[in-house]
Image (cartoon, grey):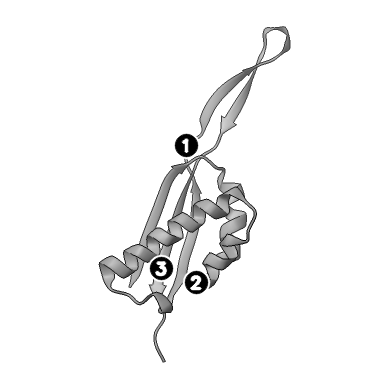
């Protein structure tokens, strides 16, 4: 059984977030939280919140044990881009793209052997 947590429309680019989620893909939840604690990127704090939400969903809603949980799937998709204008010299304007992303985490329970 897989339990899912999704964070949508977060104001960080998906490219920057992928750097962080590639580090923790397939890890146990406790080890992934330690890695995220010591990662000095903005996306690490955001991903940790989504991971904590997925763990809470697994424990509270499905009765899974915290010790056996691992990240079975994790990915980030690009969300809508906010387009803004920045004034430039001689009456011109440049477009600024403020990117958003959607983070999805699936948590599963390892089989006890």
Is disc 1 placed on a helix, strand or loop? loop
Question: Percent position (x, y) of residue 31?
Answer: 54, 72
Q: Secondary structure at mark 3?
A: strand
Q: Residue at x 61, y 23 (%)?
A: 95
Residue underneath mark 3: 107
Whole-number angstrom distance, CA of label 2 to CA of label 3: 12 Å
Query: Along the polypeptide, which appears first: circle 1 or circle 2?
Result: 2
Q: Position of residue 80 (x, y in %)?
A: 47, 36
Within 10 angstroms of label 1, few (less than 14), some, or many (20 or more) residues? some
Q: Are marks 2 and 3 in contact (CB under 8 Å)?
A: no
Which is closer to the viewer, label 2 or label 3? 2
Which mark lies nearer to you, 1 or 2? 2
Q: Is residue 24 visible?
A: yes
Residue 80 numbered mark, or none = 1
Mark sitting on residue 30: 2
User: At 55% from the left edge and 23% from the top edge, which residue is drawn?
Assistant: 84
Quick one: label 2 or label 3, which is nearer the N terminus? Answer: 2
Q: Quadrant of the N terminus?
A: bottom left
Q: Are there few (<14), some (14-19), or many (20+) residues within 10 Å of tag 3?
A: many
Which quadrant of the structure image shows residue 98?
top right
Q: Position of residue 88 (x, y in %)?
A: 69, 15
Q: Earlier in the sequence, mark 3 or mark 1?
A: 1
Residue that protrudes farthest toward the right in the picture:
89
Would you say the residues marked 3 and 1 are in contact, meaning their CB atoms lie under 8 Å apart? Answer: no
Cα separation, mark 1 vs mark 2, equals: 32 Å
Q: Is residue 98 above or below residue 53?
A: above
Q: Is residue 25 visible?
A: no
Instruction: Identify the image quadrant of residue 109.
Output: bottom left
> Residue visible at 50% across and 55% down?
47
- In the rendering, at what x and y percent does residue 19 appear? 62, 55
């Amino acid at each position: 059984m897989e339990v899912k947590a999704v964070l949508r429309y977060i104001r960080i680019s998906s490219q920057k977030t992928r750097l962080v989620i590639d580090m923790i893909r397939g890890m146990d939840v406790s080890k992934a939280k330690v890695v995220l604690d010591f990662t000095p990127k903005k996306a690490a704090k955001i991903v940790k919140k989504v991971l904590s939400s997925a763990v809470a969903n697994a424990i509270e809603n499905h009765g899974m044990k915290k010790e056996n949980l691992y990240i079975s799937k994790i990915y980030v998709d690009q969300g809508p881009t906010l387009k803004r204008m920045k004034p430039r010299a001689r009456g011109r304007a440049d477009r600024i793209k403020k990117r958003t992303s959607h983070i999805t985490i699936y948590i599963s329970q390892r089989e006890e052997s």
